[in-house]
């Protein structure tokens, strides 16, 4: 393996093994070896050796995943994409970009925006996460309601199979119905089927204007009614971020001042984009939809500075929760939009029954709510209660016709819960697909399946 990548690109020191043995979940098993290949040929050679000798092989992007996806469960080799970080081509005529998997999402966005184009997927981790990791997790973000998640933008892939063969799926053409859609099968496959080495992404023209509005409500139901109202007006905002009272309290405590008047039960942050005429009309309609359901306060942003101020609360949530010193167990459950209030009722029940602090916020347009169980990591009783609450949460979400993960994936963290959502037949079929790609089971073992 050292011959394949060159000795300079092999890591075996304790600090590296520890670093590459964790992602944002914060737990995992260190690899035995970390390799930093430079190209597809080297990755193919690594895969061939691991396949032959049955060594676990785990692809890693930036390690910002929340489910332990990039972290070995039993040691083996981690192959990091950090040297495959070139934007190969921005094709303005065909509205697409060809990139290596290690390109940082935000860098790609800035590069395409500099020529008037737009790559919409915007995970909150975009300043660090990689396109390869976004593809493998099918990452989403606040703009998902209008623009969809990563899947919608992936046209073609180059990927290394666990046996070392290189495949090219899809094409640069925007239409393609030849055979099974292997491109979309690999999107969201969490590095368990193949290692992605090149990504062709669809781009769109950059919307010229956007407008932002913040509204406060007495409760979640009113905020969701506002969302329903504006969809009834046939408005599709870019973002529709919902923040609950617990999150508002946490941010207020963090910054040392009230982010919303007392009695506020929910905050909505709405952003629309498009031409000036459309944006003016739509933001006006959004304000009406909020007032119609009795919003306590409706604040449009007059300029970029005000927009930035309105986003402060949303931007500070993660930091505010971290500064509590509590462990944040983050879930990204999703329910049909109209059932979001029922989801919040479930959270109230869990708070009471399991005596837990639960903070929720997320993408109201998609029904994708980030539910954070906040526990004292040194209190085993709280851990046990959180574990029990987690299972009930997933069961209730599925009963609400939702899903246990909208964008973070399963990794090893949620693998035990897969049967709550998928039937034995579906799981068996997925395992046969996995076996067809990876007969020796070397690629990212211990992930997705219980
Ligand atoms: C502060 C914070 C905010 C976040 N916000 C969001 C959000 O808004 N929306 C969202 O969707 N996610 C969010 N995430 C989660 C995370 O950033 C995403 O899942 C992201 O897509 C992971 O990218 P990564 O490069 O860090 O991948 P990694 O964590 O390195 O890997 C993730 C998975 O992808 C696989 N993988 C990586 N590269 C490849 C490759 N080239 N080929 C095959 N498999 C590969 C790995 O094996 C692993 O299974 C957030 C995370 C943090 C820490």
Image: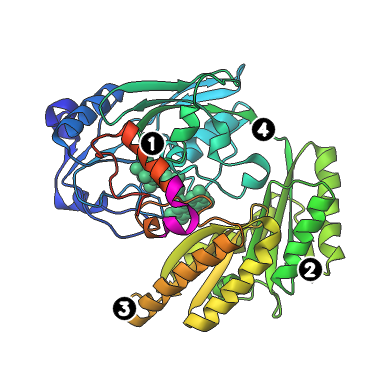
The residue nearer to you, when weighing 172 against 89, is 172
Which segment is the magenta one? Answer: 417-426
| Separation of marks 4 and 3 at Cα, in angstroms | 48 Å
Mark drawn on residue 206: 4
Quick one: SS at disc 1? Answer: helix
Distance in Å between CA atoms under marks 1 and 4: 38 Å
Dot 3 or dot 2: first in sequence order is 2
| Residue where numbered disc 3 is placed | 378
| Horizontal and vertical percent position of residue 111 | 53, 30
Residue at position x 31%, y 28% from top?
Answer: 161
In the rendered image, residue 98 lying in the magenta stretch gets the answer: no
419 is within the stretch colored magenta: yes
351, 448: nearer the viewer: 448
Q: What residue is shown with label 1? A: 433
Residue 347 showing in the rendered view: yes
Lower sequence index among marks 2 and 1: 2
Q: Is residue 420 above or below residue 111?
A: below
Task: Count residues near mark 2 (Cα–Cα under 10 Å), then give few for <14, some for 14-19, many for 20+.
Answer: some
Q: Could you tell me how far apart the alpha carbons at marks 2 and 4 are, in whole angstroms?
A: 31 Å
């Amino acid at each position: 393996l050292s011959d394949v990548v060159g000795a300079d690109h092999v890591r075996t020191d304790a600090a590296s093994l520890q670093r590459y043995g964790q992602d944002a979940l914060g737990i995992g098993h260190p690899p035995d070896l970390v390799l930093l290949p430079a190209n597809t040929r080297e990755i193919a050679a690594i895969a061939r050796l691991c396949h032959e000798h049955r060594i676990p092989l785990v692809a890693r992007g930036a390690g910002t995943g929340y489910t332990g996806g990039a972290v070995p469960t039993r040691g083996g080799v981690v192959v990091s994409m950090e040297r495959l970080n070139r934007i190969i081509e921005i094709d303005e005529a065909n509205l697409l970009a060809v990139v290596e998997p290690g390109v940082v999402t935000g860098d790609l966005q800035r590069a395409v925006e500099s020529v008037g184009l737009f790559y919409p997927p915007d995970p909150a981790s975009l300043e660090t996460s990689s396109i390869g990791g976004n593809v493998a997790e099918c990452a989403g973000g606040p703009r998902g309601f209008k623009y969809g998640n990563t899947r919608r933008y992936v046209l073609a892939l180059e990927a290394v199979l666990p046996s070392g063969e290189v495949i090219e799926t899809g094409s640069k053409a925007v239409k393609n119905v030849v055979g099974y859609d292997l491109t979309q099968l690999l999107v969201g496959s969490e590095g368990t089927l193949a290692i992605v080495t090149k990504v062709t992404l669809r781009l769109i023209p950059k919307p010229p204007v956007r407008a932002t509005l913040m509204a406060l409500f007495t409760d979640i139901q009113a905020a969701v009614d506002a969302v329903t109202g504006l969809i009834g007006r046939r408005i599709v905002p870019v973002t529709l971020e919902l923040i609950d009272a617990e999150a508002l309290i946490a941010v207020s405590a963090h910054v040392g001042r009230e982010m919303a008047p007392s009695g506020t039960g929910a905050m909505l942050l709405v952003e629309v984009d498009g031409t000036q005429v459309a944006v003016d009309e739509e933001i006006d309609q959004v304000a009406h939809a909020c007032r119609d359901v009795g919003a306590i306060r409706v604040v449009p942003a007059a300029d970029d500075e005000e927009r930035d101020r309105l986003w402060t609360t949303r931007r500070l949530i993660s930091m505010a929760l971290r500064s509590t010193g509590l462990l944040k167990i983050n879930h990204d459950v999703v329910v049909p939009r109209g059932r979001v209030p029922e989801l919040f009722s479930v959270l109230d029940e869990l708070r009471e029954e399991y005596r837990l602090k639960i903070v929720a916020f997320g993408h109201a347009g998609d029904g994708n709510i980030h539910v954070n169980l906040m526990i004292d990591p040194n209190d085993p009783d709280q851990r046990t209660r959180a574990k029990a609450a987690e299972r009930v949460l997933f069961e209730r979400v599925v009963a609400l016709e939702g899903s246990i993960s909208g964008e973070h994936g399963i990794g090893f963290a949620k693998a035990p819960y897969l049967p709550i959502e998928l039937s034995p037949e579906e799981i068996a079929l997925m395992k046969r697909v996995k076996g067809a790609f990876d007969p020796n089971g070397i690629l990212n073992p211990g992930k997705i399946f219980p």
